[in-house]
Image (cartoon, grey):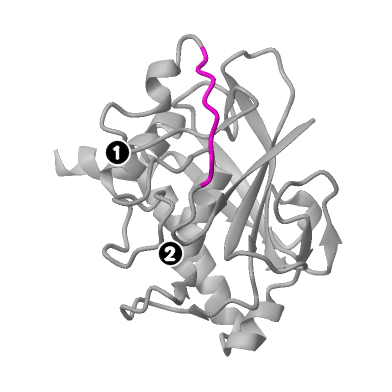
Amino acid sequence: MTRNAVSVGAAMCFAFICIFVAGIAAASISSDGSFRLLKLDGHHVKWGDSALGAGATVRYAFIDAPRRFDGARNCQDLVPMDHLALRHGISQATLQAETAAAFRVWEAAANITFVPVDDVERADILIGAQGRPTGRAFANVEYQPGSNDGVRAIERALICLNPYQPWKVGFDGDIGVYDIRYTLVHEIGHAIGLDHPGPSGQVMSFRYSEKFSDLQPGDYRGVQLLYGVSMNSMAADSTSD
């Protein structure tokens, strides 16, 4: 199993080495630079079937006890999110609701479904606070080995937030304090195979912004390239017709 990761931080660029794979090189970065697919060790990655455009169902869970993930570049040590919630006066119910809302943002955009589970061992995406606080928030993505030269199936992803950084619920114009839902939407984007397209203009851009709260056109194009269009949106379109 090969492990690699991506990170996000305010006004901090993550360096990427792009080795394009024959057949999907043109899809790696949009013509206008509005999205970029995550590339780990020369491979694009996604959940479910490795075919681009194929949908997927992904389970997620909150870390329930301190855990260490040897080999992870980011989120190596995770602790329960109550370390963050208690410090910032955010209830567990609110934290869970904001997380669920963040997953729904991507569900509404593409054919990918997220299912919360209580058993950490059954989860595909694990969410927790950093056991060794650093930066703001990170994602770690691990993919399965395989013969496909272009796209590999993601095996597990970790998302972690620094409990010692200031956090809030909702936008208030203060970009020095990050909104939890917006941050989770961004990190989930990494966890499902999207990279930073640039500094600004999309939710997946690497600078925190409160200019918009919804996915932007590039975010939609990137996730729909990976998983196809949301089944819900297609049903709504057919009904309106």
Taking the image as shown, residue 50 lies to the left or right of residue 53, namely right
**Magenta residue check for 20:** yes
**Residue type at tag 2:** Tyr
Which residue sits at x=46%, y=10%?
Answer: 23
Question: What number of labels is visible?
Answer: 2
**Residue type at tag 1:** Met
Image x and y of residue 26, in percent:
38, 18
Image x and y of residue 138, in percent:
61, 56
Q: Quadrant of residue 28?
A: top left
| Of callouts 2 and 1, the N-terminal one | 2
Q: Does dot 1 land on a helix, a strand or a loop?
A: helix
Question: Pointer 2: what residue?
Answer: 182
Tell me the crowding category of disc 1: few under 14, some 14 to 19, or many 20 or more residues within 10 angstroms, Cα based.
Answer: few
Magenta stretch bounds:
14-21
Image x and y of residue 173, in percent:
31, 78
Taking the image as shown, residue 31 lies to the left or right of residue 110, namely left
Q: How far apart, in angstroms, are the residues tagged by discs 2 and 1?
A: 25 Å
Image x and y of residue 79, in percent:
77, 69
Which numbered circle lies on residue 234? 1
Q: Are marks 2 and 1 in contact (CB under 8 Å)?
A: no
Q: Nearer the viewer, mark 2 or mark 1?
A: 2
Position above or below: 234 against 107: above
Tell me the crowding category of disc 2: few under 14, some 14 to 19, or many 20 or more residues within 10 angstroms, Cα based.
Answer: many
Q: Main secondary structure of the magenta part?
A: loop
Quadrant holding the C terminus: top left
Which numbered circle lies on residue 226? none
